[in-house]
Image (tube, rainbow, N blue to C red):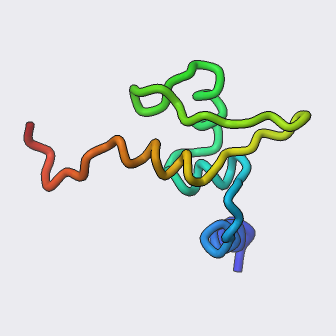
Amino acid sequence: MNITNQRNLNHSNNLSPHCDTHGAAFDLGFSSSTVRVSRVTGTLAGVPAPTYRKVGRKVIYDRIVLREWMDQFANQQNTTA
């Protein structure tokens, strides 16, 4: 198993209520760099980015906040307006 698959497996099995930037990116379906840039710009996917905490130099996301952020987007059946 390569390291990327191992990392994804660890994130999906992790029951911790918190995650780092890589875990948040995995949970939201974005790249880590996109999530990192969203902290600077304040937007992700055209809406305000999910909130995070700084503990020293470490960035922590609450998985509940990530889930609530994702819930603002409606499920789509197709791409027509």
Quadrant hosting residue 52: top right
Q: In the displayed structure, does residue 77 sit left or right of residue 23?
A: left
Q: Residue at x 24, y 52 (%)?
A: 75
- Front-lying residue, 55 or 44: 55
Taking the view exactly as shown, the residue that stands out farthest to the right is 56
Q: Position of residue 31 (x, y in %)?
A: 57, 45
Q: Position of residue 76 (x, y in %)?
A: 19, 51
Q: In the displayed structure, does residue 55 sit left or right of residue 77?
A: right
Q: Residue at x 41, y 27 (%)?
A: 47
Q: In the displayed structure, does residue 9 sit left or right of residue 29?
A: right
Quadrant hosting residue 81: top left
Taking the view exactly as shown, the residue that stands out farthest to the bottom is 1
Image label count: 0
> As displayed, is residue 64 above or below residue 7?
above
Specify the quadrant that holds the N terminus: bottom right
Q: Residue at x 66, y 66 (%)?
A: 11
Q: In the displayed structure, does residue 18 sit left or right of residue 78?
A: right
Taking the view exactly as shown, the residue that stands out farthest to the left is 80
Q: Residue at x 88, y 34 (%)?
A: 57
Q: Position of residue 8 (x, y in %)?
A: 63, 67
- Front-lying residue, 78 or 71: 71
Q: Position of residue 46 (x, y in %)?
A: 39, 26
Taking the view exactly as shown, the residue that stands out farthest to the top is 41
- Front-lying residue, 20 or 29: 20
